[in-house]
Amino acid sequence: MVIALKLLLLLLAGFTLPGELTAQNQDTYAFTNVTVIPMDTERTLPGHTVVVRDGVITQIGPTATTPAPDDVTVIPGDGRYLLPGLAEMHAHVPPGQDPPREDIEETLFLYLAGGITTIRGMLGAPYQLELREELRRGEVPGPHFYVGAPSLNANTAPTPEAADSLVRAHAEAGYDFLKIHPGVPLDAWDRMVEVAREVGITFGGHVPADVGIHHAIETGMATIDHLDGFVQATRIEGLAFGERTAMYRATDPDKLDALTRKIADHGTWLVPTQYLWNHLNGYVDPDSILAKPEFRYISPQQRENYRARAERNRQNPEITPESHEAHAEMRQEFLAAAHRNGAPILMGTDSPQLFNVPGFALHRELPLMVDAGMSPYEVLVSGTREVARYVEESLGQPGNFGTVTVGNRADLILLGGDPLADIDALRRLEGVMVEGRWIDGQTISNRLEEIAARHAQGG
Ligand SMILES: [Zn+2]
């Protein structure tokens, strides 16, 4: 009886109408005749079969000699590309203690719809720890979730004692890492570093001004997000800065070189978030940005917030088209130097901050990484293999993803074009798989239309 009931429940849970999104069971699948981009080295494997069982990649071989097994669901890959799912390493899920469930699930889905199978949450709340487990168990469709703790900042960690107890509490609660915001004083920072080492948790995010980027790197900061601290550390000495454009055009190339070499030597990961910062300090026309298709997927309130922020910048006499351009060029120069000198880079956007729609913002960020001198392959590394290395080395958790390799977690995306030739092919998503749970292209577009309809009604 119990067994029969269990079987019934399994059947019900696994039963999905085509094009309908539910929490899905892992099934057995074979992608056939697909071009695999394994991401172990820069190569492609045309005409291949990839078999997935129980959430794991179990077989890879030429379709001619590796036909799909009899008991599997076949996903034809003709003319398509199969590669590891991407990561959003500076993600946000809805903030607060108990945000509406609908908002949470929608955000998680938007990440999937952008081809993202791993997110790193950059502002924790207790509910996210439970959400992480639900995602792990496949109870809600969404990416794997590494959860940062509620941030250490000027208010939460003003003293060494406060930092000490906060680090212990966050580690005890089970957060995956510590998030740093501006304002942490130097003595509180140093205590945080000490206690974090003792309890075995790593830290990343912003570089507090009192700490400075050099000390942050030397004390083992795992990730520096937004290229924070670069401006302060690379200005030409002895110049007085009256206005922004001059300040943005005053990078000392030797200092920048030295800084980025040091970052490479220490293995500090950078999460650049160029698209966001171009807008945060930018002079832009909100209407032309909000006309882009992805803004249908967020609420009118959110769109209004974005517009108001852009308008405020336009009314700020310090921000001009010239300062916008100088700032954007400076940030690209930073990223180019970091890349040239071998600093490890992770893909991320800071969605849903200013003009960053979860999932879709990544496709705005990646061309900027290419413009800064990274090849499409190197950009893909920053969102796949390198993420697995970060998870293993910094978070101390299994890095069994990020390449299409037998034994790895089946986190995969199927594309209608070759992203090694053109990074924009990542927008041509035809399906996403998270640990063996497959969501096809039709299901993705149906759900996106539902989301757009909800927000068209002002929801
Ligand atoms: Zn953020």
Image: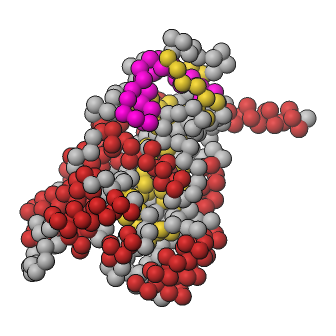
Main SS category, magenta section:
strand
Query: Within the magenta stretch, is there residue 28?
Result: yes
Name which residue lies at 54% across and 47% down: 399
Q: Nearer the viewer, residue 160 or 74?
A: 160
Residue 69, image x and y in percent? 63, 17
Name which residue lies at 44% across and 80% down: 189
Colour scheme in use = secondary structure
Name which residue lies at 28% across and 31% down: 421
Report the side of 344 relative to 3 (left or right).
left
Residue 144 visible from this viewpoint: yes
The magenta segment? 27-52
Q: Is 54 placed above or below 351 here?
A: above
Q: Is 24 placed above or below 163 here?
A: above
Residue 163, image x and y in percent? 52, 82
| Residue at the front extreme of this rendering | 265
Name which residue lies at 62% across and 65% down: 174
Residue 452 visible from this viewpoint: no
| Residue at the right extreme of this rendering | 1
Instruction: Name the quarter where the C terminus is drawn.
Output: bottom left
Q: Nearer the viewer, residue 195 or 409?
A: 195
- Corner quadrant of residue 169: bottom right
- Corner quadrant of residue 195: bottom right
Query: Within the magenta stretch, is there residue 300?
Result: no
Residue 193, image x and y in percent? 49, 76
Q: Is 440 placed above or below 342 here?
A: above
Q: Nearer the viewer, residue 364 or 296?
A: 364
Residue 319, image x and y in percent? 14, 69
Report the side of 360 relative to 176 (left or right).
left
Q: Is 198 placed above or below 367 here?
A: below
Instruction: Name the quarter where the N terminus is drawn.
Output: top right
